[in-house]
Image (spheres, grey):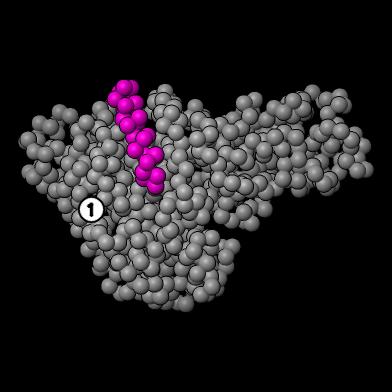
Amino acid sequence: MTTRILEFEGTLPPGGDACQAEEATPSGLADGLRSGPMIYCPTSQEKLPGTRTQFGSTRSDLARGFMRALLINPEFPNSYWSAKEALVFTGRRTLIPPLGLITVAALLPDHWECRLVDTTAEALTDEDLRWADVAMVTGMLVQREALHEILARCRRLGLRTVVGGPYATALPEELDGADHVVVGEAEEIIPDLAADLEGGYARHIYKEVRKPDLSQAPLPRFDLLKTHFYHNMALQFSRGCPFTCEFCDIIVMYGRKPRTKTAAQVIRELDAIQTSGFVGNVFFVDDNFIGNKKAVRQVLPEIGDWRRRTKAKLEFYTEASMNVADDPSLVDLMIQSGFTAIFIGIETPSAEALRETKKLQNLKRDMAEQVHGLLEKGMDVWAGFILGFDSDGPDIFDQMIEFVNRAAIPYAMVGMLSALPHTPLYHRLEKEGRLREGVSGDQFGLTNVVTKLPVDQMVSGYRRVLETLYDPSVFFDRCREYLRWYRTPSEVTRPKEAQDVRAVLRAMVAQGLRSPYRREYWRFLRWVLFHCPRQMGRALALAAAGHHYITYTRESVVPGLRRAEEQIREGRLSRRVDPHRAPRTYGLKPHPVFSLSVVLARAFALGSSIREMASPKPSLSTTASRAMPQGRSLTR
């Protein structure tokens, strides 16, 4: 059992002599320290030099408010979003850094010492934990298991814990194992929490009382990142979305009125990213970048001017609603400012399902035609799709396959409908008794929604969609159609780097010599050579990023769905409602595979060897390897 030392100002706790052990925490004192004896010592009494406290600092450190914060990002399981199979080509360990944690670090007092451990890229050691006074852990639902393992390690070492992020905001009742839980956005909570931690009277739950003004948000601590770990960097301009999609939790967490940072803030963050030495792509993690078009039109020229002035080796990508295609001048402005790709939540080709889920902004338009229009302008498109709406019939699976292929979207993230906590969909299905417990929350498998379509038909149809879309021959056919539409805006492409060329060579060896689909790979490249040789760079990038989707589908998703089909046949599925275990699929803001092929594409303009083979045809240079979120909470 760990003995903890708590220092305080004023009189001793009831019945407590100086340095007397107490078994329970008196009211008002460090309510998170709920196990083990505690020693209370008034700060006026003589210190014991070098004595370690429950937090890990010396008692004299705590007396002057000195604290060490270890910020921890739990590991993500492998998924379409992880790009694990293709990241090996780039030499990077993970896709995107934990922007939330480095923002929290910027909100902590200046006299605190901070370190960050991103377990998606490096191991968390006991020595890391012993160094700290407090562990501050973020997490989405898909990180839940890893997060609880970290909390257990901290408890064993007597380290105080604070948990925040989407998981804590949605299901704080699952986090009794944490000493302190932050529910909501952090900007106006962290300063009070830090003061309470220093004072020794921090509460268990801290909740936001209003949505923070992002124009007051601090510059994230990019200096804490080991930038060589990451394939992309992250930056946030806005939070919130004006639409009311039934399945989406963004308006629940962030509201319907998009709040934005100023152009000056965005430029400071871009300066910080460039100063870090990072070269590559920056993901604007906004849930709907064009949610506030007026603000976007003001910030884009500033971004473009900064990029031209600094000659920064950065390109940008983001998420936006389908109505971006209605505004050609805005698309042009985005491209001129350095944006090369967007993720769009198309969700379904069914107009009836779009009306059902209140995704009205996708109606009254030919979405495939609009995707083609964006590609022709030089804006790459990745998209998310959902199966399992109430109006979906047995023909929805063929409709989905036909639409994705016709729209020429190489990376289509197709998932099954999931009811996220606190969303209108969740409340409706709860009333109807249509929530299923005991499922993982993986949107690429069985979710918590009891669909109108029989579950056996739903799962087998879903498996067929993914097997078909990521069959190598179908995937490369879709890439061919994509290349017929895409035109590269040459003014935004960044110079090629040595790391890009290395990525190309690794991909060609892995796919062209070792993969089981190498024949389809070489057929595709041969077609490119004869029909659009100047797009060879983008073609190589499409193929390289597709390696993850093809491999992950074949080795993980399809076997998992076959196991689910077997469970269904054996009657081992529960239909009971359990609101505390309902799966949540928060958009992996920090884990879209979005731009994996962008880096590859730079290289894949391969300079000499490929260009020597190419004849003058329309050129294409960059591709974004995107894992499109289906059923994703952040899809627009």
Residue 462's place in the image compared with 346, above or below, is below
Q: Residue furthest front?
A: 294
Q: Is residue 581 above or below residue 47?
A: below
Where, quadrant-wise, is the N terminus in this rendering?
top right
Residue 465 coordinates in the image, percent (x, y):
29, 64
The residue range painted magenta reads 289-313
- For mark 1, give the secondary structure: helix
Can you tell which quarter of the image residue 6 is in? top right
- Name the quadrant containing residue 313: top left
Residue 34 in view here: yes
Front position in the image: 60 or 213: 213
Going 38% across and 68% down the picture, which residue do you hit? Answer: 356
* Residue 26 percent across, percent down from the top left: 84, 45
Specify the amino acid type for callout 1: Gln
Query: For residue 310: magenta?
Result: yes
Q: Is residue 578 above or below residue 2?
A: below
Most common secondary structure along the magenta stretch:
helix
Q: Foreground: 542 or 170?
A: 170
What residue sits right under mark 1 in the picture? 370
Residue in the image at 32% along x and 69% along y: 352
Q: Position of residue 272 (x, y in %)?
A: 44, 26
Q: Please say whether residue 598 is visible from this viewpoint.
A: no
Q: Residue at x 46, y 68 (%)?
A: 449
